[in-house]
């Protein structure tokens, strides 16, 4: 009986730890570039998984999204994805850049990461 209680304790502890770890992972950011020009400003981050700054920038984008909600479309262009090659070449986008688009889908600015959540919001307000 004691062995069964100890085993269930470890199972419950493992599940709780897993839930805690998952809650701290950054939320995924949409990768559908067709959403640019949907009537809302958009930010596209050129994400390269081999760059440590990419994860930091993704976290800052999530923070900005939490602050301003759905007023802006936050998107990610993952380097190496063959479906985004034309977009990347057309805009000459390179990691770790952020591309800013107005509500009509026109490129209005670009910055190199790391851009804080507040700076992102300020850039979007100025455009």
Image (cartoon, rainbow, N blue to C red):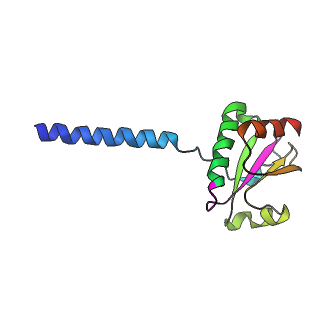
Q: Residue at x 77, y 46 (%)?
A: 43
Where residue 10 appears, as percent x and y from the top left, is 26, 41
- Which region shows up in magenta? 39-52
Which quadrant: the N terminus? Answer: top left
Front residue of 102 and 122: 122
Quarter of image, res 8: top left
Magenta-colored stretch includes residue 40 = yes
- Residue 87 part of the magenta segment: no
Quarter of the image that includes the C terminus: top right
Location of residue 45 in the rendering, given as x and y in whole percent from the top left corner: 73, 52
Residue 17 image position (x, y, % from top left): 38, 41
Q: Is residue 45 left or right of residue 10?
A: right
Relative depth, front residue between 113 and 36: 113
Residue 44: percent from left, percent from top: 75, 51
Above or below, comparing residue 101 to residue 92 in the picture: above
- Image quarter of residue 87: bottom right
Total labels drawn: 0
**Residue located at (12% from left, 37% from top):** 2
């Amino acid at each position: 009986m004691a062995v069964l209680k100890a085993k269930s304790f470890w199972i419950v502890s493992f599940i709780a730890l897993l839930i805690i770890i998952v809650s701290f992972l950054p939320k995924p950011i949409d990768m559908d570039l067709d959403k640019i020009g949907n009537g809302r400003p958009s930010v596209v981050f050129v994400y390269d998984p081999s760059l440590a700054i990419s994860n930091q920038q993704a976290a800052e984008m999530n923070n900005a999204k939490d602050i301003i909600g759905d007023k802006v479309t936050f998107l990610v262009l993952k380097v190496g994805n063959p479906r985004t090659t034309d977009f990347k070449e057309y805009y000459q986008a390179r990691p770790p850049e952020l591309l800013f688009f107005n509500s009509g889908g026109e490129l209005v600015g670009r910055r190199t990461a790391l851009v804080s959540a507040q700076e992102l919001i300020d850039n979007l307000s100025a455009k």
